Amino acid sequence: MELPDAPDAQLQAAKSVALPMMMDMIRDDLAVLGVKHDYFLSEQSLHDDGSVDKALDELSAKGLIYQGVLEPPKGKEPPPDWEPSPQTLFKSTDFGDDSDRALKKSDGSWTYFAPDIACHFNKYQRGYAQMIDVWGADHIGYIKRMQSAVTAITDGAAQLEVKVCNLVKLMRGGEPVKMSKRSGSFITLREVVEEVGKDAVRFMMLTRKNDAPLDFDFDVVKEQSRDNPVFYVQYAHARIFSVLRNAKEQGVAVEDATLAAAPLTTLTHDAELTLIRLLGTYPRMLLAAAQAREPHRVAFYLLELAAAFHALWNLGKEEVKLRFIQEEDEAGTLARLALIRATAITLASGFDVIGVTPQDELR
């Protein structure tokens, strides 16, 4: 590739090659992680096709843009060279924001806020009145102005919800993995997935609420112990299938139709009833997680369900009558197998919701 002589032209030539390559890498990384993203919109395209001007014209026609002077930032000392100057402002305070917001810089170019408005107006024009944005925690102060702009430009017909995500700190053996953008020393998402697997990454990302920091320890994620939440839940699912295989080898009918007719009145132990009650909360939990846009609730539930199953398993080591398979108690055997089969179905359903593949056997 030959580069032109002019620096600006060189930059544009390099961008024309690098940008498509980087987007291909991003799409590949998302695919590896099991994330489907249908539509990508370039900020530059919003400038090139006049979308920014059209969106701002829309707000101007509503009387929501004016020339004014902003006060210096509250709680901060203004820069020594600061002086009040007229700016193009959006009447964000009309919609509950604590300040009107600048749309143009002092050099006449648009602020980041202007193309962001155009981007959300583009979503609305494509038929999406309910919008959910996922932002980093460092942009939390930007939420109200963006919500105000969406309300204003759509006359209240669209709603913007913003989910804020905090940082993930990569660890090894309890120690932070040192990374530096300046030195080019960093670990990519692709490398994380290649080392621990897609399912482990997806599940671990949901072991904290999205707005809470997360320590992702490679060593913990690869452990086969209860300290590893991914293994702990997968182990419960695999254990159940091990019991069902064992029962089948002993001549017990373990088909779902047979287990569905099992006499569940024999399940009276506190540990059995605890598991039954927990299974009964699954539909409500799932609905609440969806309504609150909080998928971590599913992971938390799966951990709780796995713990209840493991507790029942461990009791069987101490109390013979609680063992899942008992040759002299067919009714009790079928009831307990029905209970753990229901547990496996629920674990698999929860895994499916969060995009994790349940394991019938761990090697």
Image: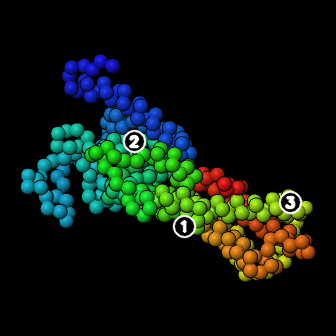
The residue mark sitting in front, 2 or 1, is 1
Q: Write down the quadrant of residue 269 in the picture.
A: bottom right
- Disc nearer the start of the sequence (2/1): 2
Q: Nearer the viewer, residue 41 or 110?
A: 41
Q: In the displayed structure, would residue 68 be above or below residue 273?
A: above
Q: In the displayed structure, would residue 185 be above or below residue 174?
A: above
User: Whole-percent x and y of residue 298?
Assistant: 59, 62
Q: Are marks 3 and 1 in contact (CB under 8 Å)?
A: no
Mark 1 residue type: Asp
Q: Which residue is mark 2?
A: 119
Q: How is the image coloured?
A: rainbow
Q: Residues within 10 Å of mark 2 (few under 14, many from 20)?
A: many
Q: Which residue is mark 3?
A: 248
User: Whole-percent x and y of residue 319?
Assistant: 77, 81
Q: Write down the quadrant of residue 291 in the picture.
A: bottom right
Write the residue at 84% across / 77% down.
Answer: 266
Quadrant for the N terminus in the image: top left
Mark 2 residue type: Cys
Q: Which residue is mark 1?
A: 227
Q: In the displayed structure, would residue 306 be above or below residue 30?
A: below
CA gap between label 2 and label 1 equals: 43 Å
User: Whole-percent x and y of residue 301?
Assistant: 61, 66
The residue mark sitting in front, 2 or 3, is 3
Q: Write down the quadrant of residue 329 in the picture.
A: bottom right
Q: Is residue 237 visible?
A: yes
- Disc nearer the start of the sequence (2/3): 2
